Image (tube, rainbow, N blue to C red):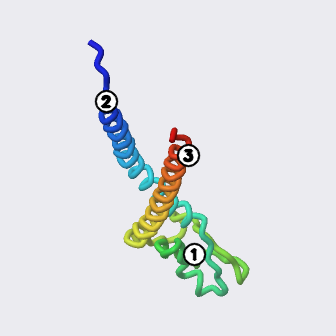
Amino acid sequence: MWRMTTIEDAVESERGSRHRWLIALVAFGTPAALLFSLTMALVVAMNDQALVSDRAGLKSVDLGWPLVWIHQDQSSSDPPFPTHVGMLSPWEHPTGLSLDAFLVDALTVFVAVGSGALLVGALVAALVRRRRVSHSPA
């Protein structure tokens, strides 16, 4: 049998649909943002460069941004000084990692990505609301 829905039921249905989208966005967006943050912290550190001005500086090359979490001994290499050095093979150069600093770097990226997503979402919602109000019959 056909049943007419009231305006209140339609509004409630629309509201429930919006909540389902929000739950899906949080459920899938949070792990995706976390994976992106971990990847970005790793990529930034692998492409980081440190300025070394003498042989003693090669003993501990510190990489990672904003916090240093990779420490590498590159004293076996003999570059001209001053020079910029980056991550070299951990098989050939002793490497130390600081997991705490790496996680703080990833958390920093996660917070930045989350804040940006919230701002963009709020802006889109405000624009949609404004458009609905301006196009609704008086």
Q: Is residue 72 above or below residue 21?
A: below
Which residue position holds label 3?
Answer: 134
Crowding around mark 2 (Cα neighbors within 10 Å: few <14, some 14 to 19, many 20+) is few
Amino acid type assigned to the residue bearing label 2 in the image:
Thr
Measured as percent of width and height from the top left, residue 5 is found at 31, 26
Q: How many numbered tags mark residues here?
A: 3
Which residue position holds label 1?
Answer: 74
Secondary structure found at label 3: helix
How far, Cα to Cα, is label 1 from label 3? 64 Å
Measured as percent of width and height from the top left, residue 131 is found at 55, 46
79 and 43: which is toward the camera: 43
How far, Cα to Cα, is label 2 from label 3? 24 Å
Measured as percent of width and height from the top left, residue 52 is found at 64, 82
Which of the marked residues, 2 or 3, is nearer the chain's N terminus?
A: 2
Amino acid type assigned to the residue bearing label 3 in the image:
Ser
> Which residue does the image show at 40% across and 46% down from the upper left?
25
Q: Is label 1 in contact with label 2 (beta carbons under 8 Å)? A: no
Which residue position holds label 2?
Answer: 6
> Which residue does the image show at 53% across and 70% down from the upper left?
93
Query: Quadrant location of the N terminus?
Result: top left
125 and 105: which is toward the camera: 125
Which label lies toward us, 1 or 2?
2
Which label lies toward us, 1 or 3?
3
1 and 122: which is toward the camera: 1
Which of the marked residues, 1 or 2, is nearer the chain's N terminus?
A: 2
Amino acid type assigned to the residue bearing label 1 in the image:
Gln
Secondary structure found at label 2: loop
* Residue with the most extreme right position: 80
Secondary structure found at label 1: loop
> Which residue does the image show at 54% across and 73% down from the upper left?
63
> Which residue does the image show at 34% across and 45% down from the upper left?
23
